[in-house]
Image: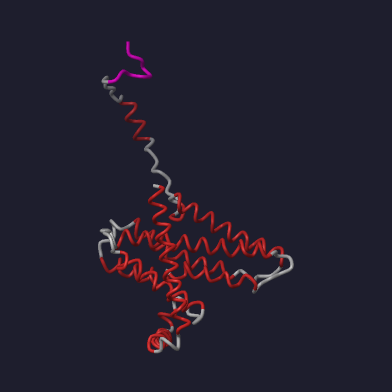
Amino acid sequence: MTSIFFPRSGVKTTATASDAADSKSHPAKPPRRLPFFLRTEIDRLLIAGIFFSCLLVLIRIMHTRTFGFLFIIWNLFLAYVPYAISSWLSASQTRLKHPLIKYAAFIAWLLFLPNTFYILTDLIHLTHYQHPRAPEWFDLALIFSFAWNGLLLGVISIRQMEKLYRPRQYPGSDWRFIYPIMALNALGVYAGRYLRYNSWDILSNPFQLIADLASMIIHPFRNHYAWDMILCYTILLIFIYTMLKKISKAMA
């Protein structure tokens, strides 16, 4: 005798007319879609880390009644822009048919990408905004949390774009994508920290930016300090990215 709750394997059950009517009157609701910045576990962890960093700034403002580190929230927002672009491209690559959209998004991503690693240099502000009611260990944790979030945003974003624009990987191919990207990042970090340019200056003040970069190229020995930093940061970023990438593969 077949149970009405657990029919035997191989026995076909047929839907009644009432079941069909119920399914029509009560259609299944589509699954609720989360905001784009909360759809994956990595997204949620990044948002949690960003929230924690901003909370540290808020606590410092409440205790010191000063706004010394408020600027670093804006820096982290600019660091999130390239991650948002690469995540959007990764999620919609099958729907993007026109190559011009992909190239325009890539250029926009490349312009904002140095902001992710620029926050590393905000560690120089550790002694600039000292306050008796803010211990040094707290300020160090605050700045480092922002720098760490920016670093993660940059590494993950580059990995996403690497999968999109360099799908066929073979030994010795890093110099075609990763190395130039990291060199441009280092150049952007220097231009932002010491030449005081922003990402949008490429559009709002392109001639002055080109003139300053041309002077660095024409007079390399005169600007050896700049090239020393760019070379150092290029190597550092390559090591960081490669190490985190290898660790991710090894732990997978």
On screen, residue 217 above or below 17: below
Using the image as rendered, state which of residue 164 and residue 170 is in the foreground.
Answer: 170
Report x, y in % for residue 213.
41, 84
Q: Is residue 47 left or right of residue 70?
A: left
From the viewer's perspective, is 51 left or right of 153?
A: right
Residue shown at the point (39%, 49%) measured from the top left? 250
Name the foreground residue: 159 vs 242.
242
- Residue 208 location in percent, x, y? 43, 87
Q: Is residue 113 above or below residue 192?
A: above
Residue furthest top as drawn: 1
Tell me if 162 is positioned left or right of 230 in this view.
Answer: left
Q: Residue at x 40, y 41 (%)?
A: 29
The residue lying furthest to the right in this view is 132
Q: Position of residue 173 (x, y in %)?
A: 28, 64
Mostly what secondary structure, the magenta segment?
A: loop
Instruction: Say if the magenta span includes residue 187.
Output: no
In this picture the colour scheme is secondary structure
The vertical placement of 7 against 74, above or below, is above
> Splitting the image into 4 quarters, where does residue 4 fall?
top left
**Magenta stretch in the rendered image:** 1-9
Count of all numbered marks drawn on residues in the image = 0
Q: Position of residue 200 (x, y in %)?
A: 44, 77
User: Viewed as shown, does residue 206 lie left or right of 134?
Assistant: left
Q: Residue at x 35, y 33 (%)?
A: 23
* Quadrant in which the N terminus appears: top left
Residue shown at 28%/60% (left/top)?
Answer: 171
